[in-house]
Amino acid sequence: MQLLVVTGAGVSAASGIPLFRVGADAVWAKDTTEMGTSGFFRQAPVAQWRWYQERFRSASTARPNAAHFALARLEEAVPDFLLVTQNIDKLHEEAGSRKLVKVHGSADRVRCSKVGCKNAAPSGSLAKSDFDADFQRFSDDPRRETLPSCPACGALLRPHVLWFDETYTEHDSYQFGRVAEFASAATDIYFIGTTLQVGVCAMVLEQGTRRARPAQVTVVDPDPRVEHLQLAMRWSGLPDVRVDTVKAKAEKFLPRLVRELGR
Ligand SMILES: [Zn+2]
């Protein structure tokens, strides 16, 4: 068995981190996809950093839930394993996951906004905690002049996250190539707690199914949105692939899966 698990915001929901695209608390629904862009950063870096500060604050007090711990145990039970998360929180790492790709970046890191700087894309990033004092100064007096800047070149720091108007290949740490390679050989693929609307899901599905022996694909969600996957498949010119659905919350389903695989 070569097992690939892709997780989305639904996995962190039980830890109190708001969902991105579904429900009244949805982050993107409230703030629109406009704020999570490099265009918005260039236009209004003060407003964007204040918005991120607010989001990161709610994430910093969150603790892993049963879904995160079950995935860490799954990694021990299945030698050929990779966890790919769309979440930028630290909950998978805190629960003990190590074979982990954070394909949308990480809230605990920042990077220089000036491409070509050693602290910028395609491979540079910095621990956000090294700039705690700078971010505190900015929070106390939020204006352009107090925005934290790159220690190497003086350009503004930006969050180390994938924005809506950027691509997965923008930064090496998103490890898109590693994910594609693993997906192309996976025997089992689980999409858990994701609305399947982001590019990585379409790519994983294409790699996992466009071959003689396609992977077994399972979507686990309280409200599985398989139509999004089918749409993505049609866009990619893929034939209809059989996808199993499990209507369940991640924190209920995953401990069960670990027990089954352990038998
Ligand atoms: Zn720089």
Image (cartoon, rainbow, N blue to C red):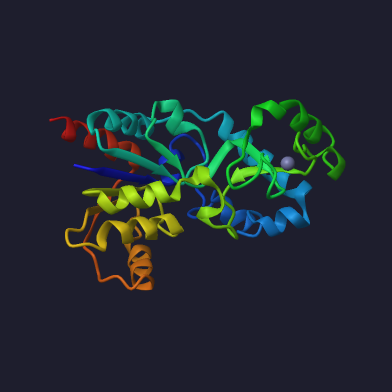
**Residue 220 placement, left or right of 54:** left
**Residue 232 placement, left or right of 58:** left
Q: Is residue 221 visible?
A: no
Q: Is residue 100 visible?
A: yes
Instruction: Compare residues 250 and 98 and report the one nearer the observer.
Output: 98
**Residue 107 placement, left or right of 179:** right
The x and y percentages for residue 208 are 28, 56
The x and y percentages for residue 79 are 24, 33
The residue at 42%/55% (across/down) is 200
The residue at 54%/43% (across/down) is 105
Decide: is 206 above or below 99: below
Decide: is 44 above or below 117: below
Residue 252 placement: quadrant: top left
Q: Quadrant of ligand 1?
A: top right
Task: Name the residue furthest right.
Answer: 145
Instruction: Compare residues 81 and 143 and report the one nearer the observer.
Output: 81
The x and y percentages for residue 70 are 31, 31
Instruction: Compare residues 7 and 239 and report the one nearer the observer.
Output: 239
